Amino acid sequence: MKFVFNKFNAILLIAAIIVTIAGYIIMGTGDKTISPILLIIAYVILFPAAIIAGTKKEKKENTK
């Protein structure tokens, strides 16, 4: 089994975790406008991008 995450995937994953934590911290302070936007960005864009980016590179390497 080969680990397909590379440096770019790790950066995206760390960014997603930071944005998620920031969203929950801001939600805890009572702001109901920015926190859902941050959480949607993290869950809908950053987490899937961190997973998908590695699989596309893996497919390109296998076709060579």
Image: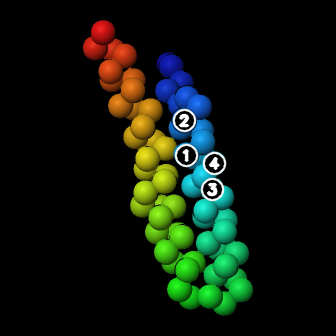
Is disc 4 placed on a helix, strand or loop? helix
Point 42% across, 37% down: residue: 53
- Residue type, numbered disc 4: Ile
- Residue type, numbered disc 1: Leu
Q: Residues within 10 Å of mark 4 (few under 14, many from 20)?
A: some
Q: Are marks 1 and 2 in contact (CB under 8 Å)?
A: yes
Q: Are marks 4 and 1 in contact (CB under 8 Å)?
A: yes
Q: Which residue is mark 1?
A: 12
Q: Position of residue 50 (x, y in %)?
A: 49, 44
Q: Which residue is mark 3?
A: 17
Q: Are marks 4 and 3 in contact (CB under 8 Å)?
A: yes
Q: Position of residue 7 (x, y in %)?
A: 59, 31
The earlier-in-sequence mark between 3 and 1 is: 1
Q: Residues within 10 Å of mark 3 (few under 14, many from 20)?
A: some
Q: Which mark is residue 14?
A: 4
What is the spatial separation of the Cα atoms under label 4 and label 2, in whole angstroms? 10 Å
Q: Residues within 10 Å of mark 1 (few under 14, many from 20)?
A: many
What is the spatial separation of the Cα atoms under label 4 and label 1, in whole angstroms? 6 Å
Q: In the rendered picture of this protein, how many numbered marks are placed on residues?
A: 4
Q: Are marks 3 and 2 in contact (CB under 8 Å)?
A: no
